[in-house]
Image (cartoon, helix red, strand yellow):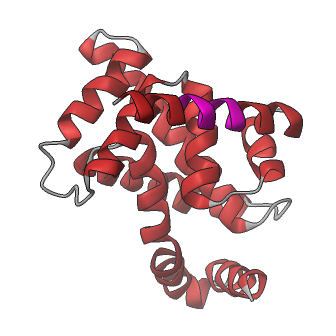
Amino acid sequence: MVVEKEYEILELIKTPQTTEAGYRMLLQEYQQQLYWQIRKLVIDHDDAHDVLQNVFVKVFKGIKNFKGDSKLSSWLYRIAYNESMTFLTKKGKQLQIDNSELQAHLVDQLEADVYFTGDEIQLALQKALAQLPKRQSEIFKMRYYDEVKFKDIAALLELSEGAVKSSYHIAAKKIEQFIKQD
């Protein structure tokens, strides 16, 4: 079903008379999903919207060159992931702090975010994730929140599946320890 939908979207976009309808369908199908994937990485609501706009600009410019070597959703997720990482790197440089300090800063801001509807447990999880090394945090978020398969995470991050599994399990143990202490 998903593959059929992706094929339909790509065909609409490739056909000049239906390109606009294809873009609308692409937005309708993936905008919310990509927003939440980005939000989990950048944490802040407004930042997630900014990154999402950048993602769709890149997608609209590059989709006609999409070869179909992977699923459309995988391609979109990779663009969203790369844009999120670029954004976080720039934000860290602007604030003149490293990644772990940036994550802690973002979690602190989360408590004041009117769009954050989580409870104490979700906030504790975000704080625990901020304590993890960047790669472990990324892998944990993809697997835990989005239920991305280990092999797909490995392909996305260009790592072995064994390395991804190991990082996930180490991250899970660290999170469990952090939450027990808190």
**Residue nearest the viewer, comparing 68 with 131:** 131
Residue occupying the point 39% across, 51% down? 39
Answer whether residue 102 is magenta in the image: no
- 119 relative to 4, above or below: above
Residue occupying the point 51% across, 34% down? 175
Highlighted range, magenta: 168-174
Q: Quadrant of the N terminus?
A: bottom right
Locate residue 53 relative to residue 70 in the image: left or right.
Answer: left
Residue occupying the point 51% across, 29% down? 177
Magenta stretch secondary structure, dominant: helix
Locate residue 123 relative to residue 30 in the image: left or right.
Answer: left
- 55 relative to 103, above or below: below
**Residue nearest the viewer, comparing 38 with 171:** 171
**Residue 139 shows in this picture:** yes
**Residue nearest the viewer, comparing 109 with 118:** 118
Q: Quadrant of the C terminus?
A: top left
Q: Looking at the picture, how far across and down is residue 80, in whole percent?
A: 53, 50
Residue 118 occupies quadrant: bottom left
Q: Looking at the picture, how far across and down is residue 87, in whole percent?
A: 41, 33
Q: Looking at the picture, how far across and down is residue 25, in whole percent?
A: 52, 84
Residue occupying the point 88% across, 35% down? 162
Locate residue 104 relative to residue 117 in the image: left or right.
Answer: right
- 80 relative to 171, above or below: below
Q: Looking at the picture, how far across and down is residue 149, in whole percent?
A: 76, 56
Answer whether residue 172 is magenta in the image: yes
**Residue nearest the viewer, comparing 123 with 95:** 123
Total number of numbered discs in the rendering = 0
**Residue 62 shows in this picture:** no
